[in-house]
Image (spheres, rainbow, N blue to C red):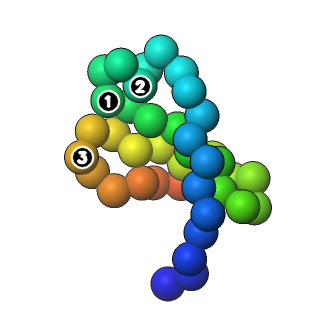
Amino acid sequence: MPSYYFKEIWTPLKLVGIKFFRDDELRLWVKLWSKKRTLLR
């Protein structure tokens, strides 16, 4: 499995546990509460 560098994107949804990340290839990932990150696009 490849290793990615993630940068978190701040949104108001972070207050309820939904976090968005960009990886080093500029793809968008989402993390819902304590589940694993999933690729959006």
Give the residue at mark 3: 34
Residue 31: x and y, percent? 40, 44
Instruction: Establish if 30 lies above or below 27.
Output: above
- Residue 8 location, quadrant: top right
Residue 12: x and y, percent? 47, 15
Give the residue at x 75% y 53%.
26
Q: Secondary structure at mark 3?
A: loop
Give the residue at mark 2: 14
The answer to whether residue 41 is seen in the rendering is no
Give the residue at mark 1: 17
Q: Secondary structure at mark 1?
A: loop
Q: CA distance from mark 2 to mark 3?
A: 12 Å
Instruction: Establish if 7 lies above or below 25.
Output: above
Q: CA distance from mark 1 to mark 2?
A: 5 Å
Residue most toward the top?
12
Give the residue at x 44% y 35%.
19
The amino acid type found where label 3 is placed reads Ser
- Residue 23 location, quadrant: bottom right
